[in-house]
């Protein structure tokens, strides 16, 4: 019970610190905002680690999830480096790797339930359709909003969009299959809501990064970071249930 209380306090602390982080970087990244963001990032790793301790085991699923959280932490670290653009590229690659690790974890979790259900192909027809629709919708919104995207940026964004939508699809399948297998519905909430919040966070940050009209939109920054930290906390908590 004590560990559950500590985990809940850390999770709430991460959400609470979000406002102060966004407020600290109103005029751009600075050492104070970097410190606050990394405290929040360390918080979601702590939640994941505590969930591993509470389950009393360290499975392949847990390993992939912790690795995903660590790459997210590195992504937070590099994206907030304000003194050279190379850190932005490294941050992007870290988050891309993080999503791939999440996908690996979800597939492992889904396959562990083959006792109940036959093993599924990597992409179902429904998943392919969903990914194509959402990536197309994302680019439609970017074009309509007149985001400043250079030619070289389009391919990495397409790749990232496909990866994160794959992550959302696999998280949704994992949540649904977990409930079918008799695991608490909270597992589905953590998996699906966490993935949805991650997509919303990435969608909103695209406006902050590529649309000059929104670069200093404080409310959008709050939305971006609240959905991001909520996503990380929910996905870290998933370790406790799967």
Image (cartoon, rainbow, N blue to C red):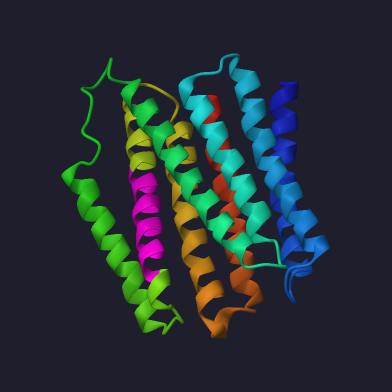
Choose top left, top right, bottom left or bottom right for residue 182.
top left
Above or below, comparing residue 142 to residue 225 in the picture:
below
Q: Check the image and name the residue furthest to the right.
A: 32
- Is residue 100 in the magenta section? no
Q: Is residue 178 visible?
A: no
* Left or right side of 93 for 154: left
Q: Is residue 166 visible?
A: yes
> 4 or 134, which lies in front?
134
> 242 or 61, which lies in front?
61
Extent of the magenta region? 154-169
* Left or right side of 169 for 208: right
Choose top left, top right, bottom left or bottom right for residue 10.
top right
Residue at the image position 72 percent from the left and 68 percent from the top: 83
Residue 90 location (% of width, % of height)? 57, 55
Residue 61 location (% of width, % of height)? 47, 26
- Is residue 166 in the magenta section? yes
Residue 44 location (% of width, % of height)? 65, 41
């Amino acid at each position: 019970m004590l560990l559950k209380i500590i985990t809940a306090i850390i999770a709430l602390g991460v959400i609470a610190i979000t406002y102060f982080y966004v407020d600290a970087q109103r005029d751009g990244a600075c050492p104070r905002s970097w410190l606050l963001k990394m405290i929040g990032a360390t918080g979601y790793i702590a939640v994941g680690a505590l969930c591993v301790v509470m389950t009393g085991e360290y499975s392949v699923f847990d390993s992939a999830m912790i690795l995903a959280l660590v790459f997210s932490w590195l992504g937070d670290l590099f994206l907030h480096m304000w003194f050279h653009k190379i850190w932005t590229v490294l941050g992007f690659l870290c988050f891309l790797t993080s999503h791939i690790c999440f996908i690996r974890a979800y597939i492992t979790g889904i396959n562990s339930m083959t006792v109940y259900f036959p093993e599924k192909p990597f992409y179902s027809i429904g998943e392919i359709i969903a990914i194509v629709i959402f990536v197309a919708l994302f680019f439609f919104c970017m074009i309509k909003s007149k985001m400043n995207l250079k030619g070289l940026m389009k391919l990495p964004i397409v790749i990232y969009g496909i990866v994160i939508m794959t992550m959302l699809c696999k998280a949704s399948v994992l949540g649904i299959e977990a409930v079918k297998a008799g695991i608490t519905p909270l597992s589905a909430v953590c998996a699906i809501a966490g993935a949805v919040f991650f997509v919303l966070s990435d969608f909103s940050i695209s406006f902050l990064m590529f649309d000059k009209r929104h670069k200093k939109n404080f409310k959008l920054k709050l939305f971006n970071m609240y959905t991001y930290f909520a996503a990380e906390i929910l996905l870290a908590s998933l370790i406790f249930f799967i």
